[in-house]
Amino acid sequence: MEKFYRIGELAKLSDVSQRTIDYYTKLGLLEPDKRSDKNYRYYSDETLSRLKRIETMKKEKYTLEEIKIAFEQLDKVSHNGQVTDKLTSLQVHMHQLEKELKELSPMIDQLKPNQIKQAFKFITPQSAACIEAILILLGKGPLL
């Protein structure tokens, strides 16, 4: 059975203020899943996930307008919440990986080729390929 939260519970679980939730609702980033007879707003676990994704994207320096556009585009692509969740999650992870690689880039530049090969032995081939691809996109070229 799906759990629903009142705004105060949602705020505590997501570590944002009720005022922020109200603001996101006004912007169209969130909406209550149902209302009680006394007009209390109730939010689902899916809304909690969405709120956490919004906060993660904000930490990644996305503007609220960019976040809204991203959600609108994903909602158009699929009304299936699982696909939307996975795509949004992937987008956030890719942005985070790009940021981390930019931070690591100066350190990687100081490594010798044999040190780089040793480091790559400790990660999966898929991770290595992903890192290589992002470095190429950042203009660093392949490491190996």
Image (tube, grey):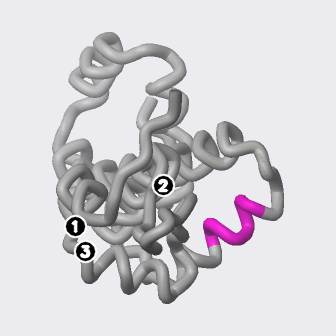
Residue type highlighted by circle 1:
Val
Residue 113 image offset from top left, x and y in percent: 30, 28
* Label 3 to label 2: alpha-carbon separation: 14 Å
Quick check: 13 above or below 17? Answer: above
Residue 77, which numbered label?
A: none
Q: Is residue 24 left or right of residue 121?
A: right
Residue 54 falls in which quadrant of the image? bottom left
Q: Is residue 55 visible in the rendered structure shown here?
A: yes
- Which residue is depicted at the point 45% across and 26% down? 128
Residue under label 3: 18
Q: Which amino acid does label 3 sit on?
A: Gln
Magenta stretch, overall SS: helix
Q: Is mark 1 on a helix, strand or loop?
A: loop
- Tag 3 and tag 2, C-beta contact below 8 Å: no
Query: How far is mark 1 from mark 3, CA to CA?
Result: 7 Å
| In magenta stretch: residue 50 | no
Q: What amino acid is at disc 2?
A: Thr
Q: Residue at x 54, y 44 (%)?
A: 90
Span highlighted in magenta in the image = 70-75
Give whichever of discs 3 and 2 has the lower sequence position: 3
Camera-side residue: 139 or 87? 87
Residue 17 percent across, percent down from the top left: 20, 73
* Horizontal and vertical percent position of residue 39: 46, 74
Relative placement, left or right, of 40 versus 74 is: left
Which residue is labeled 1 in the image?
16
Which comes before the other along the chain, label 1 or label 2?
A: 1
> Residue 47: which disc?
2
